[in-house]
Image (cartoon, grey):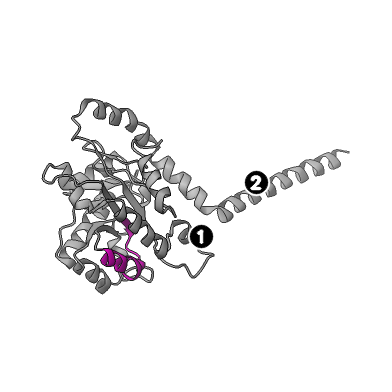
Amino acid sequence: MHRQLLYGALTGIACLALFVIGVFIIQHYKYPQTKITTTFLETNKTIVKKLPDAIKKQLNDASPSATFRVPILMYHYVENIQNPKDKLRVELNVPPAVFEQQVVTLKDAGYTFMTAKELGEVLDGKMALPEKPILLTFDDGHWDFETDVLPILEKYHIKATSYVISGFIGGSDFMTPQELQEVINSGLVDVGAHTVHHLSLARLPLNTVENEVDQSKTWLEQNYHIKVVSFAYPNGSFDQQAIQVVKADGFSTAVSTVPGIAQNQTNRFFLYRLRPGYRTGQTLLTWLSQNYFAAY
């Protein structure tokens, strides 16, 4: 009798263990991006929770010129994907034809395309904000920026900002040094830094954050003889320490993945951005008109 009870208990424990392991495997391998996204949101949860009241207070107290309605659109891949099993690529991709339609929509609607450098100058009071401003930003420095994005920028003669992972240039999924030089030579692209190794910066040791931020800026400036003044946090991961390092390193702005459109001095080192997805035409314009405060 005791043996049967013991056997039954052990069997139950074994089944429970198998169930837990099975759930873990399904979540980890079938839904990896869900897990990654949750981690990114949790990384910024503390600082993000503190933003709304501060932003609203400044909007209430500041003069009309202190806060600007500037949509900053965020892209990663712009290509015709060959491998549909590359889930992360599929999730972050906007096909070139869709991107071109977005550009046409915005241009026809009277939007003025700016760079992150120019937005910094607006925040510094060195430049007037153009009518209906908008920024196109591209993270990582993938090869398709040169092959698919640049021709569209040149076709419509519009500006953009490319945030480059300096340590990945020349890698199989990234622009070669020569391609990056062609992008710079176009005169349409402001190149920003995106760290050396694409590390999530929140809660990292100070010296690691300093090396990732400073060396990415220094490498781009020394190798391409440009001034790098804007930064993008890898995976949208930042904390107060990362902000201070970016400020101390001489950047004028930094972009986050916090959704919203209102840009000002309070958030100039974690500027809000929006993912346009596949929106085009009136759908895109209506969506932009409905965004203002950061969404939490």
Foreground of the two, 235 or 98: 98
Question: What amino acid does circle 2 point to?
Answer: Val
Q: Which mark is residue 11?
A: none
Q: Position of residue 130 (x, y in %)?
A: 19, 47
Find disc 2 in the rendering and name its residue: 20
Q: Residue 107 colored magenta?
A: no
Of discs 2 and 1, which sits in the foreground?
1
> Magenta region, mostly helix, strand or loop?
helix
The image shows residue 55, relative to residue 150, as above or below, that is: above
Label 2–label 1 contact, CB within 8 A: no
Kindly indicate the quadrant of the structure image that contains residue 220. bottom left
> What residue sits 72% from the left and 43% below the top?
13
Label 2, residues with CA under 10 Å away: few <14, some 14-19, many ≥20: few
Foreground of the two, 206 or 131: 131
Foreground of the two, 178 or 290: 290
Q: Is residue 275 in view?
A: no
In the rendered image, the residue lying farthest to the left is 126
In the rendered image, the residue lying farthest to the bottom is 178
Which mark sits nearer the N-terminus, 2 or 1?
A: 2
> What residue sits 15% from the left and 47% below the top?
121
Find disc 1 in the rendering and name its residue: 87
Q: Position of residue 155 (x, y in %)?
A: 28, 67
The image shows residue 131, relative to residue 100, as above or below, that is: above
Q: Is residue 173 left or right of residue 3?
A: left
State which region is magenta: 137-156
Q: Position of residue 286 (x, y in %)?
A: 39, 44
Q: Is residue 36 in view?
A: yes
Helix, strand or loop for disc 2: helix
